Image: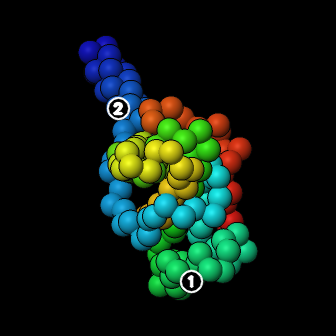
Amino acid sequence: MKRLLFTAFTICMFTNNLLAQEDNYMPIDYTVIAEGNDSPFQNLQIVCFNKYFNREQLPKAFKDKYDLANKQLFKKKMLVQLFYSDKDKIGLDKFEIREVKESSSDIIIDYHLVNSDSTNDSSIQSPFIVIQIPKNTKKQIRFFANGKELGKGQDLYIDN
């Protein structure tokens, strides 16, 4: 009887431990490939698994300026591109990546939009950032802007 109780207890603890690990997030190394204040889009998140998607979505002058068609960018990596337009002229002119992390099912990109230069607050700003992370097409990518999760993929474009 003791052995049966011990076995049942061990199975419960092992299962509970496995379920708890599902929610564990680990940081992902990322590299900033390009950033600036000349975004060609307003309020858009793009995940690129290969150069062909970038070819279709981004203006040629923008791709050329930041070398975003370079095949080397996509070798075992993918690009996450964030675009914003500060139409309300409140001075949001730069992306700051807080963290990039993953669990067994998700990749989370957590960032803030900040006012890094108060001298340009009276004009419309269009910041963007392009980061490179390890390629993983099986995980859901979730974006958190200024502490709030963005709308469940409605502005997320993925090319598999």
Q: Do callouts 2 and 1 mark residues in contact (Cβ within 8 Å)?
A: no
Q: Position of residue 16 (x, y in %)?
A: 38, 27
Pointer 1 local density, CA inside 10 Å: few below 14, some 14–19, many at least 20: few
The numbered mark at residue 28 is none
The number of callouts visible is 2
Quadrant of image for the C terminus = bottom right
Residue labelled with disc 1 = 64
Calculate the distance from the C-alpha at mark 2 to the C-alpha at mark 1: 49 Å
Check disc 1 and report its element: helix, strand or loop.
Answer: helix
Q: Position of residue 47 (x, y in %)?
A: 59, 61
The residue drawn where x is 56% and y is 46% is 86
In this view of the protein, which residue sits in the foreground, 19 or 92?
A: 92
Query: Is residue 108 left or right of 59 when viewed as pictured?
Result: left
Q: Residue at x 44, y 50 (%)?
A: 120
In which image quadrant can residue 5 be found?
top left
What is the crowding at mark 2: few (fewer than 14 residues within 10 Å), some, or many (at least 20)? few
124 displayed left or right of 117: right
Question: Taking the image as drawn, is residue 4 in sight?
Answer: yes
Residue 106 visible: no
Element assignment for label 2: helix
The label on residue 17 is 2
Q: Where residue 78 sits: x, y (%)?
A: 51, 68
Name the spot of residue 103 as percent of width and height, x first.
43, 45
- Examine the rendered structure and indicate whether residue 75 appears above or below residue 26: below
Q: Amino acid at mark 1?
A: Asp
Q: Nearer the viewer, residue 135 or 13?
A: 135
Question: Residue at point 50% right, 56% down?
Answer: 127
Disc 2 marks a residue whose amino acid type is Asn
Q: Nearer the viewer, residue 108 or 102?
A: 108
Q: State left or right for residue 143 relative to residue 56.
A: left
Quadrant in which the N terminus appears: top left
Residue 104 shown left or right of residue 21 in the figure: right
